[in-house]
Image: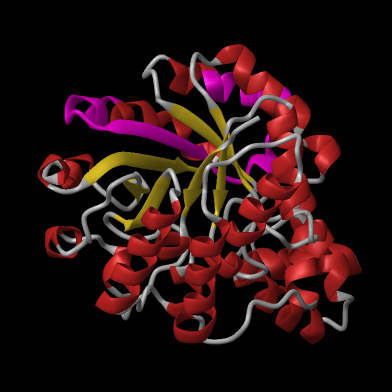
């Protein structure tokens, strides 16, 4: 088994440093990963992140024409950007054929999936490859996943990812989801694993065992909260375990990871109570501080409040929605 490896440091990693990658950071990450033989390098969002708005976000949160034009030329890697339809108009992609970008990744939550086919078709009309990232896949049962696959399948995406946005999945919950997508789609399937429960690599391997052929990762695991599967660990595993195969140069990938650790990360990636609570309770990491603050005001156990939030599968967790849960828990 020889997975296609996609590094998303410059896109997902921006959740850690507000996308404030310097031009030197971008050149070093892209050039080193390309030298290593990484298959696809995602260089940022076109039009902004859908999950974290910021007035101070750096260049890789927008991927302007100037930012894309300054990217180093790659010899091996395909370059990609991510588009979130709820924040990026479809016409905002029109200039991408004049850039080094070869793939556009269209990311949507299950409740916004109906808008995805229009974007996939638009990407194809531009002569680019289109990927779909189904986010918050832990909120989706197999029947709903079949319906999602049917909705996006008609647009013929080039690859469809299941994204464990909340880091809540475990290896035993991966296989059936991958198999369901493969049964309904005529394209490869990928996995984007978060590491809240320390299962990023295990979940990626479970997906590959079930037939997924694309794997996301980021250098040092750089992403929000507990982070992603680390690119250097994914390559090391694929090299050390004879069951798998990769042509990616581990030494060069480790060089890129060392650069990120020493020059880019504002602080080391850690997995503490907040990250674990978000994964165990199956909700967005960004909501954890709000849950803890309001639970304390109601003198309730934040873990149990978080569990109730996750069980409700809320699309957005506002102060009011947390307060509503707390009132229900105290019977008021």
In reply to whether residue 135 is colored magenta, the answer given is yes
Number of residue marks: 0
Residue 70 placement: quadrant: bottom left
The answer to which of 206 and 3 lies nearer the viewer is 3
The answer to which of 319 and 238 lies nearer the viewer is 238
Is residue 287 shown above or below 282? Answer: below
The magenta span reads 121-149
* Rendering coords of residue 162 (x, y %): 59, 38
* Rendering coords of residue 40 (x, y %): 41, 45
- Quadrant assignment for the C terminus: bottom right
Give the color scheme: rainbow, by chain, secondary structure or one colour: secondary structure
| Residue 57 in the figure: left or right of residue 167 | left
Residue 115 in sight: no
* Rendering coords of residue 325 (x, y %): 77, 63
In reply to whether residue 89 is colored magenta, the answer given is no
Seen at 31% across and 39% down, the residue is 103
- Quadrant assignment for the N terminus: top right
Is residue 309 shown above or below 130? Answer: below
Residue 206 in sight: yes
Seen at 58% across and 13% down, the residue is 184
The answer to which of 69 and 168 lies nearer the viewer is 69
| Residue 241 in the figure: left or right of residue 154 | right
* Rendering coords of residue 141 (x, y %): 73, 30
The answer to which of 212 and 144 lies nearer the viewer is 212
């Amino acid at each position: 088994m020889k997975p296609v490896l996609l590094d998303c440091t410059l896109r997902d990693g921006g959740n850690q440093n507000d996308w404030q990658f310097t031009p030197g950071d971008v050149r070093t990450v892209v050039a080193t990963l390309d030298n290593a033989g990484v298959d696809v390098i995602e260089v940022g969002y076109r039009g902004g992140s859908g999950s974290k708005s910021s007035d101070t976000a750096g260049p890789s949160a927008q991927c302007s024409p100037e930012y894309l034009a300054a990217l180093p030329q790659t010899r091996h890697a395909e370059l990609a950007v991510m588009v979130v339809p709820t924040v990026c108009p479809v016409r905002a992609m029109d200039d991408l054929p004049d850039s080094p970008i070869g793939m556009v990744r269209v990311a949507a939550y299950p409740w916004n999936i109906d808008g995805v086919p229009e974007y996939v078709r638009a990407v194809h009309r531009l002569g680019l490859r289109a990927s779909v990232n189904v986010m918050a896949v832990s909120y989706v049962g197999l029947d709903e996943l079949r319906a999602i696959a049917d909705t996006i399948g008609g647009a013929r995406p080039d690859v469809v990812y299941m994204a464990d946005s909340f880091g809540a999945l475990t290896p035993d919950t991966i296989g059936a989801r991958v198999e369901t997508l493969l049964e309904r789609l005529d394209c490869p399937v990928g996995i984007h694993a978060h590491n809240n429960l320390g299962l990023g690599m295990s979940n990626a391997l479970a997906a590959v065992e079930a037939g997924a052929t694309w794997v996301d990762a980021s250098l040092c695991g750089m992403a929000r909260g507990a982070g992603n599967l680390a690119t250097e660990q994914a390559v090391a595993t694929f090299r050390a375990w004879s069951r798998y195969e990769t042509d990616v140069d581990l030494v060069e990938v480790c060089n890129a990871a060392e650069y990120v650790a020493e020059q880019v990360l504002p602080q080391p990636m850690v997995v503490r109570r907040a990250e674990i609570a978000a994964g165990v309770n199956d909700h967005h990491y960004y909501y954890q501080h709000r849950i803890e603050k309001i639970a304390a005001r109601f003198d309730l156990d934040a873990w149990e409040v978080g569990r109730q939030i996750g069980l409700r599968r809320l699309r957005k967790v506002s102060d009011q929605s947390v307060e509503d849960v707390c009132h229900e828990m105290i019977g008021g």
